[in-house]
Amino acid sequence: MRVFCLALLFALLAGCAGPRIDDSYSAAGQSSRVQYIVLHYTSTDLARSLRLLSEGEVSSHYLIGDGPPTIYRLVDENRRAWHAGDSQWQGRTWLNGTSIGIELVNQGYRDGPAGRTWQPYPPEQIDALIVLLKDIMQRHQLAPGSILGHSDVAPQRKVDPGPLFPWQRLAEAGLLPWPDAQAVARQQALFERSLPTVAWFQAQLAQQGYLVPTHGELDEATRRVLAAFQMKFRPSRYDGQPDAQTAALLLVLNSP
């Protein structure tokens, strides 16, 4: 009787442990669920950033301090973090499920009597970010260009990481495509003679991946998308107005 009870107990325990999983085979047809990395600034200091991102509903996978640039892992990469919100890129929507969110401690901007001022990013913070990005992209086999700003995926409501974020440094590290300056200058000279239509700009922005209207009118939504693109590739002026240099940047980036 005792032997029977022990056998029954072991059987019950085995049942509670769940089904037996055989991992000896692995399918060739698979890829990472992670398709993008989205960069943000926190708009506040480190202490409050840690509280907001660990205790509230908003979260990110990583937080990078502003000095010394400690990297905090707040959410496992296999889990969804709540950082992108209502977002879209290349036709994919609600990117929380397919992206890794990285927050950088940075105050963002302040509006004052002299206008809007932005906080720069310490070089050491960007150095730490580049190391982290290279590691993530290698592990998830992401192609250059998979790194986006919050303003790219939600241009109607977000401006982070802002015009002082050094996108070109990431390009120099091989993390994203960057337009060749000479090719841009040649195309700009041509576009200064005849500027493309608004519909052309909208089509080129959509090819980049932006969610943009396609009605051919320069409305507020289109200007916001143009400003997001300009902030990334021409941060010296991001007024959201179509011009020859913006057209040249788009054409060079979209050319094979």
Image (cartoon, grey):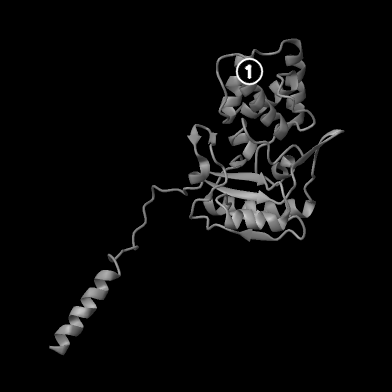
Q: Nearer the viewer, residue 145 or 39?
A: 39
Q: Residue furthest right?
A: 114
Q: Is residue 110 left or right of residue 208?
A: right
Percent position (x, y) of residue 167? Answer: 71, 41
Q: Residue furthest top?
A: 194
For image coordinates 57% across by 51% down, the residue present is: 59
Q: Nearer the viewer, residue 36 or 193?
A: 36
Q: Quadrant of residue 19?
A: bottom left
Amino acid type at circle 1 is: Asp
* Residue 35 makes an appearance in the image: no
Q: Is residue 81 left or right of residue 129?
A: left
Q: Quadrant of the N terminus?
A: bottom left
Percent position (x, y) of residue 117? Answer: 81, 38
Q: Quadrant of residue 85?
A: top right
* Residue 136 makes an appearance in the image: yes
Q: In this rendering, is residue 188 above or below 145?
A: above
Q: Residue furthest left?
A: 1
Residue denoted by label 1: 219
Q: Quadrant of the C terminus?
A: top right
Q: Quadrant of residue 14?
A: bottom left
Percent position (x, y) of residue 53? Answer: 61, 54
Q: Is residue 152 left or right of residue 26?
A: right
For image coordinates 77% across by 27% down, the residue present is: 182
For image coordinates 48% across by 45% down, the residue present is: 97
Q: Nearer the viewer, residue 99 or 177?
A: 99
- Disc 1 is placed on an element classified as loop
Disc 1 crowd rating (10 Å Cα; few below 14, some 14-19, many 20+) is few
Q: In this rendering, is residue 47 above or below 101?
A: below
For image coordinates 60% across by 44% down, the residue present is: 38
Count of residue discs: 1
Percent position (x, y) of residue 160? Answer: 68, 40
